Image (cartoon, rainbow, N blue to C red):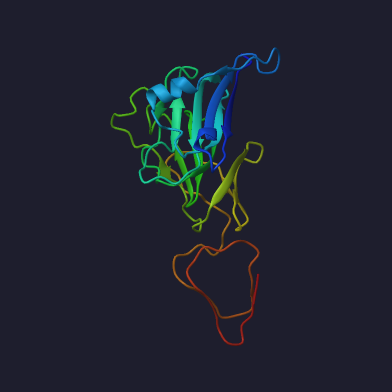
Amino acid sequence: PDVGYLGFANIKSDDATCDIKKVFKSIDATTTNTWVDITANILADLPGIFDYIEISQIIVNPANPNDIWISFGKISDNNYRRVIRSIDGGDNWIDYSLNLPGIQVNDIEYYKGSNNGIFAATDIGIYYTDDNYYDPTNPNGSNTGWICVSNNLPVLLINDIEINYTTNKIVLGTFGRGIYEAELPTSLPFTMNTDNPFDCTQDLVISTNTTINNYISCGNIIVNANAKLTI
């Protein structure tokens, strides 16, 4: 089906009446292009969800256009309403944020070939969940929810996630700390096995002339006398 979803925000900070957020759905997005406002469906299940919270991303299951996730990009004093999900085309919605920290989710990305796996980019790292960890038909049941998969990554703000299925790698775009990539997992749970020869939690001591071409994840960098570090 030719289905599409669109998030909209009209914000004017000095006028609360202009702080309007909407979600629209179309079943003919590239043809007749007719859009229907489904915001009321979200508010019916999650009242106040749009209060001071911005939509950061909407993604759709590529095999099922009725399976939708929406992420939000605002800091919260609780650990819910970071991500919400609908499995019936936007008629009904659930909070899908179990074990996500109460910070903004900047991006989410669907992992093709998984059991509806989703990666979430946050201000402190990357998280993952799928239907094995988080059952959408029983969201209040005994679920693991989201798991942190930032192993081997420094603490950083991740803005964007892309998956390259040709090279079988996940690529992370960060705020001010470059671009990182890792092999996609073959099993879960998994470690982000990034190409980092200096992965450590202790100080990195440079005793001889050393050149670092990759990023480093460690404590302090100490360069001994008569040694040179080139980055």
Residue 147 on image: x %, y % = 40, 43
Nearest the viewer among 111 and 209 is 111
Q: Is residue 112 visible?
A: no
Outermost bottom residue: 225
Residue sitting at 60 percent across and 80 percent down? 208
Residue 31's image quarter? Answer: top right
Position above or below: 178 against 14: below
Residue 37's image quarter? Answer: top right
Position above or below: 13 against 176: above
Looking at the rendered image, the quarter that the N terminus falls into is: top right
Residue sitting at 62 percent across and 61 percent down? 214
Residue 221 on image: x %, y % = 53, 74
Nearest the viewer among 110 and 213 is 110
Residue sitting at 41 percent across and 36 percent down? 81
Numbered-mark total = 0
Residue 76 on image: x %, y % = 40, 45
Nearest the viewer among 131 and 199 is 131
Residue sitting at 50 percent across and 39 percent down? 119
Q: Is residue 178 visible?
A: yes
Position above or below: 119 against 219: above
Residue 229's image quarter? Answer: bottom right
Residue 174 on image: x %, y % = 59, 52
Looking at the rendered image, the quarter that the C terminus falls into is: bottom right
Outermost right residue: 31
